[in-house]
Amino acid sequence: MDALPDGDALTLAQMIREGEVSASELLEAAIRGVERINPQLNAVVGTLYDDARARVAQPLNTGPFAGVPFLIKDLLSDYAGAPTSSGSRFLKDYVPEQDSDMVVRYKRSGLNIFGKTNTPEFGLTPFTEPALFGPARNPWNPAHTPGGSSGGTGAAIAAGLVPMAGGGDGGGSIRIPASCNGLVGLKPTRGRTPAGPTRGDIWFGCAIELPLSRTVRDTAAALDALSGPEPGDPYQVPPPPEAYLAALDTPVRPLRIAVSGQPMLGDDMHPDCLAGLDKTVQQLEALGHTVNSDHPPLSRSAFVEAFIVLLVAETAADVRDFSRKLGREPKRGELEPTTAALVRLAAAFTADDLALALRELQWQTRLYARWLQSYDVFLTPTLAEPPFKIGKYQPSGADKFGIQALNRLPLAGIAKRSGLIEKMAQDIFRFIPNTPVTNVTGDPAISLPLHWNDAGLPVGMMFAGQFGDETTLLQLARQLEQAMPWAERRPPVHAT
């Protein structure tokens, strides 16, 4: 085998159990696929081949994915003894001493970790173009972005390097690459999967991890295997009434679905995204669901401003925390200019600025939750445009000069008043106007690959659900997967 067989993770695990193929054979096929295809995509940026080979030389455990080759994101998913760079030159030699809780669970589920995927520095952008590793590329068109921050993961799955791989989502970073690469991407309810062992939550509870996949059943089985609290976790989410994978056998009930083509945090919506939305609405109505046009009562400017304060605070805290772990501050040039500007800008905010920002986001969460009580699900395009050409959102011209100047300013307050970061944030929110909302509210949301544009690029649709109700989202996703199948689509750059 030059690459993995063409099946999802559960299929590969079944093949191993039934003796059709060995875990060692699958691993070597996955490695060959990466070595052959990755130079075109730059999706995989670290290898753990020896560890993975040692695992399959031992008896496999009884996990649902026993022996299935797997890649983890080079951010948050600490693997003891291997660098976790977080896409940063500052952390390229940072080696954690213990596995993160999610990596422990990946291994317990039987997934065989053999490499790490590309991510932007500290996961700060919805595209994957770190200075450390260079841009990851979209297998549907390598000139275009695979999204971010789990962009390497999305590209690797779409290209058939693995059937499933690790992702994390603090502002859409599971759903963005799912949309860009034609995949299933579920952001679970806040607290559904752990963030430990050293942290209780990430980005004040906005960020959470779960793999991306090609099929709904893989996503459901992954959520079964990986969810549940650890001692000391700050959030306790009620468990589902039955296993998520088993729940897929129950047809979804007729749902009340709100739909909006109006971006929540951005300015406009690309016609390709609206075309996908219209097609999805027609399919939902044909399936017996009630679809109403409606829009949540959010204050865009207040939301964006508060989210920026949160982002600035967490970025500065990350750099300071890693500085303590490494025993030194970042050297000149080790942080990308935008990251350095965010760290510098943090000094201009006070403790009450942060508290007020959190209160604003909590207030908007309650406005959204009260509005959503009238519906089971809220449907929007995942993104405001199809995958764009690499480099489109990199600072250039005046913005680049402004960032350089900001990093030289003597007073952080001047940087705060400059408005440059707010302008850059608005540029980003034009691309991701919908995904950050459920990161703030903590509700589950899933991106499904329900549309491709005339250029052959995927355009995802996002379904947001009630807090704690991943089951309804997965049942609806399964129904749409059967009505509008996508799993057999293959991009031009593919391992098989």
Image (cartoon, rainbow, N blue to C red):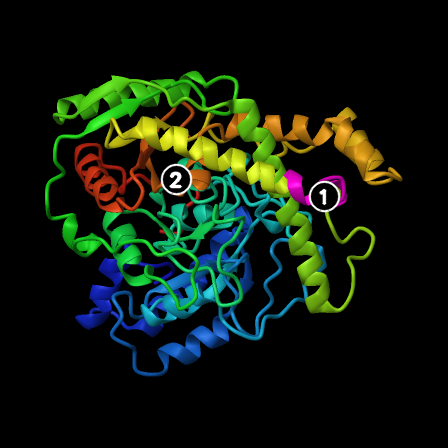
Picture disc at residue 38:
none
Instruction: Please identify the quarter of the rendering in which residue 33 is found.
Output: bottom left
In the picture of the structure, the residue carrying the numbered disc 1 is 346
- Of 180 and 203, which appears nearest the observer? 203
Give x and y (percent) for residue 152.
50, 49
Picture disc at residue 491:
2
Q: Can residue 460 be seen in this view?
A: no
Tag 1–tag 2 contact (CB < 8 Å): no
Give x and y (percent) for residue 164.
36, 54
- Of 246 and 13, which appears nearest the observer? 246
Q: Is residue 234 above or below residue 376?
A: below
Give the quadrant of the N terminus. bottom left
Left or right, 347 with reference to 219? right
Task: Write down the region rendered in magenta.
Answer: 343-353
Q: SS for tag 1?
A: helix
Q: Which amino acid does label 2 sit on?
A: Pro
Q: Residue at x 20, y 69 (%)?
A: 20
